[in-house]
Image (cartoon, rainbow, N blue to C red):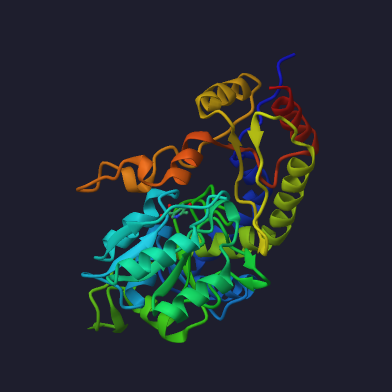
Amino acid sequence: MPDSPIPSVDFAALWADIGPQALEAVSRMGESGWYVLGTEVEQFERDLAAAHGVDHAVGVASGLDAIEIGLRAAGIGPGDEVLTTPLTAFATALAIARAGATPRFADVDEFGLLDLEAVERAIERHPAIRAVVPVHLYGHAVDGARLQQLADAHGVAILEDAAQAVLAQSAGRPVGADTIGAATSFYPTKNLGALGDGGALLTNRPEIAAAARELRDYGQRAKYEHVRLGLNSRLDELHAAILRTAVLPRLAAATDRRRAIAARYLAELRNEKLIVPGAPEDSASVWHLFPVFVVDGDERDAFQAYLREQQIGTAVHYPILASAQEAWDAPEPPSTYPVSDRLARTELSLPIHPYLSDEDLTRVIAACNAW
Ligand SMILES: *Cc1c(COP(=O)(O)O)cnc(C)c1O
């Protein structure tokens, strides 16, 4: 009998779990007769802020917009340079450009996170760098104390990309708690996924939250009073309703499950052809993804095909560096960032989602060890 498929993300299992409560949320919202910026968004923002451990959450239309709005709320715009990682979703760098600023890149460390030594050198060399966007990639928290030090020593704004890292903490502090804030995404594959697009800015700074509320709604301070050139980037009542009562209440348990899966991978994966880095010190990771790195990058695609033959779904995060994308006027060759380049050529993400059973996990581990 052929093995049953083990998908890298399991939306069928998700719907089987949340379906009834999601439908109840849709009815509640439909019957309310209020579809944009109402009580569902307000209550969800409060619940999300409390769950993550910050004072404010501002719901927006996507993770991309949350980053742009966070930067603009901090006064970053045309003429400014913003430093980020090349090993990320293109949206991170695109949001910087959308804010009117110019993205600049620094290399990553062996975990795939911005190398903060390289960041400091870049800031010292380029005075136009006014902000840094670290990405909590794979659900690992970038060192928060070190980020604060950079902000204090150099006067740069830090806006964190937590699209993969709701609930992640660095040395016991929630990501985004001590900086401008953290932008997150409710894209369906994310840890806190909606049934469509959405995002939020998480922050402890009331003035940033207030600016973000204006920016998401045409720059309005009060109805028909426009004090900024804003966006239409409102989180729908529909998604807020579903997130609030069907998805967010499951997030803590889902995160525990991801951590338990990661712990088994870390304990049981044994193959000299694979590098399995684990989480950085001080990072309470939420394990949005479980990356392994193939020692010989030329074998990565063969490894993925081998797992596919056994019906095991995987993905690559990310095959092309954000700095090398054709969309820029002057794309940089991948070799400009040697560690990012190597990780992009060798990374493969194994299944890690809350609906992965122990038996399926055993099968994935056995397949990896037998390769
Ligand atoms: C998904 C993602 C984004 C973009 O979020 P969207 O909601 O899809 O716009 C940005 N940064 C990172 C690291 C992401 O994973």
Give the residue displayed 35% in from the left and 77% down from the top.
73
Which of the pair 2/207 is nearer the observer? 207
Q: Quadrant of residue 173?
A: bottom right
**Left or right, 249 with reference to 123:** right
On the image, the x and y values in percent for residue 128 come to 27, 70
On the image, the x and y values in percent for residue 287 come to 64, 52
Which of the pair 137/221 is nearer the observer? 137
Q: Ligand 1 falls in which quarter?
A: bottom left
Give the residue displayed 39% in from the left and 80% down from the top.
155
View extreme (top): residue: 1
Q: Quadrant of residue 27?
A: bottom right
Tell me, yes or no, if residue 126 can be seen here. yes
**Left or right, 133 with reference to 24:** left
Count of numbered circles on the image: 0
Q: In the rendered view of the protein, which quadrant contains the C terminus?
A: top right
Q: Is residue 2 above or below residue 14?
A: above
On the image, the x and y values in percent for residue 100 come to 24, 65
On the image, the x and y values in percent for residue 36 come to 40, 69
Tell me, yes or no, if residue 69 can be seen here. no
Q: In the rendered view of the protein, which quadrant contains the N terminus?
A: top right
Give the residue displayed 64% in from the left and 71% down from the top.
51
Q: Is residue 366 above or below residue 103?
A: above
Give the residue displayed 59% in from the left and 65% down from the top.
244
Which of the pair 301/37 is nearer the observer? 301
